[in-house]
Structures are given as C-alpha cells and as structure tokens.
Amino acid sequence: MFLVTPALAGNAAIDGVWKMGNGKLVVKVEHCNGDKICVKIANIAKAFHDDGTPRLDDNNPNPALRKRPVVGLQIIDNMAPTGSNTWKGKLYNSDDGRTYTAYASVSGAALEVKGCWGPFCKSLNFSR
C-alpha cells in the first residue's frame, strides 16, 4: 500500500515539464528528498554555440564546474514547501553564476518562479 502525505498530495501538481512563456527555457520539476522539489534545465533556446559545441556553465564561480553543459543542469535543489502549492529555496542562475533566494507557486497549468536578490525580484512564468 502506498500512502500519500498531505504535503505531497497538495503539491504533486508541480511535477512535470514546464516551458517559459517566451519559449526560451524548458525545465523539469520533480519531487526529491520527500516533499521538496528539484528543478533541472530540460532545454534552452540556444543550447549550442554556432560551432556545435554545447553551451556550458562558464559563469560558475567554481572553476571546476564551468565545463558542465547547461542542458541537464540542476538549478534548484531541495526547495522546501511553505504552504499549499508554494515553495522557497535557492535558485542557481547559469547566466550570471549567482544563487538567488527563490519562491515557486503553481496554480493549475501555471508556474511562477521568483528569484530575489535582497529586495529586488524577477518573476519567470511557465506553463505545461
């Protein structure tokens, strides 16, 4: 018998593949470590350079990680639930190599991810 905890039952709607409104980014969201969520880049509009080489995580502050392809990169790890269909955690941005405080919320077929640096926030909107 499989039991679903209330946290998992209320937050299961976030699992799946989500596409950013402008089509430039596709992410895969799945539960990890119980009721937390993890997010990987599934695809980006410019996944390869003109010469055919993959786009790399070349802005990473850790030189040892700069050779990782951006597609497949985990950008959110262990984002914790804060309520029904809401989460808080850290978001890694491969565009600038920084990590931001992040908030995610899902409503039906809409996912909003907000990355914040101090009082400044930027929202990204996704759909299934």
Image (spheres, helix red, strand yellow):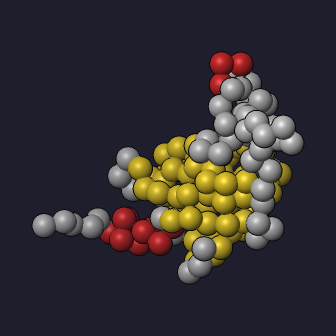
> Could you tell me which residue is drawn at 41 percent across and 50 percent down?
32
> Could you tell me which residue is drawn at 68 percent across and 41 percent down?
70
Quadrant position of residue 67 = top right
Is 41 rendered above or below residue 65? below
Q: Residue farthest to the left?
A: 1
> Could you tell me which residue is drawn at 80 percent across and 68 percent down?
22
Q: Residue farthest to the front?
A: 51
Horizontal arrangement in the rendering, residue 118 relative to residue 128 (left or right)? right
| In the foreground, 68 or 125 | 68
Horizontal arrangement in the rendering, residue 102 relative to residue 4 (left or right)? right
Is 45 rendered above or below residue 77? below
The answer to whether residue 19 is visible is yes
Q: Residue farthest to the top?
A: 64
Horizontal arrangement in the rendering, residue 27 relative to residue 4 (left or right)? right
Quadrant position of residue 64 = top right
Number of labelled discs?
0
> Could you tell me which residue is drawn at 38 percent across and 47 percent down?
33
Is 3 rendered above or below residue 55? below
Q: Quadrant of the N terminus?
A: bottom left
Q: Quadrant of the C terminus?
A: bottom right
- Residue 7 position within the rendered picture, expressed as x and y whole percent measured from the top left: 37, 65
Horizontal arrangement in the rendering, residue 100 relative to residue 46 (left or right)? left
| In the foreground, 108 or 114 | 108
Is 125 rendered above or below residue 109? above
- Residue 85 position within the rendered picture, expressed as x and y whole percent measured from the top left: 51, 69
The answer to whether residue 75 is visible is no
Q: Residue farthest to the bottom?
A: 108
| In the foreground, 114 or 109 | 109
- Residue 50 position within the rendered picture, expressed as x and y whole percent measured from the top left: 86, 42
